[in-house]
Amino acid sequence: MTASDKVEVAIAIIHQNDQFLMQLRDDFPNILFPGHWGFFGGHLEPGEDPETGVRRELYEEICYTPTTITLFERNEDKHVIRYFYQTELTVPITTLELNEGQDIGLCGIADIQRGYKYSSKVGEDRPLGTPHQQALLAFIARQDDLT
């Protein structure tokens, strides 16, 4: 498989006051990490650059247009190239419009470390997707290294 055969996705780590905006994914069995908390973002369109893609996805999924967004990390495996961007949430969460997923919420560091977050809409703790949790733990560790 060549690099051009790999799926490319752009994902956003959105933070506000040491909390991270997460989406509770739908419980559809045909999607990755059904019923798990994950990031906003998604597949790039053909010919689309990653930053444009993540901005498009944020607008489509929650009607949010960040003022600044920076690449945090790029990684790939045999099938997927992932671009992780980071940005600050500069508006109240109540102003966001959830257009994809079951719930939206700010996830604290303790939730990230334990790997679960409570959903008031579903009425139970739901797990964080493993790659989402790992990316957040790496992001937090790098921020701690900078302070």
Image (spheres, rainbow, N blue to C red):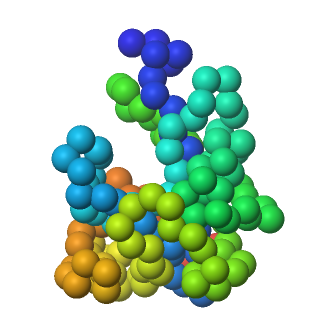
- Residue drawn 66% across the image and 75% down it: 89
Report the number of discs.
0
Q: Nearer the viewer, residue 6 or 100?
A: 100
> Residue 70's x, y, as percent?
71, 55
- Determine whether, in the image, residue 76 is placed left or right of residue 110: right
> Residue 32's x, y, as percent?
29, 46
Picture quadrant of residue 14: bottom right
- Residue drawn 30% across the image and 58% down it: 26
> Residue 76's x, y, as percent?
45, 34
Please say whether residue 137 is visible from this viewpoint: no
Image vertical order of residue 62 relative to residue 21, above or below: above
Image vertical order of residue 40 relative to residue 98, above or below: above
Picture quadrant of residue 83: top right
* Quadrant in which the N terminus appears: top left
- Determine whether, in the image, residue 40 is placed left or right of residue 91: left
Image vertical order of residue 138 relative to residue 146, above or below: above
Picture quadrant of residue 90: bottom right
> Residue 98's x, y, as percent?
51, 67
- Determine whether, in the image, residue 76 is placed left or right of residue 83: left
- Residue drawn 24% across the image and 69% down it: 127
- Determine whether, in the image, residue 129 is placed left or right of residue 19: left
Please say whether residue 35 is visible from this viewpoint: yes
* Farthest-out residue, right: 67
Q: Nearer the viewer, residue 131 or 22?
A: 22
* Quadrant in which the C terminus appears: bottom right
- Residue drawn 57% across the image and 70% down it: 97
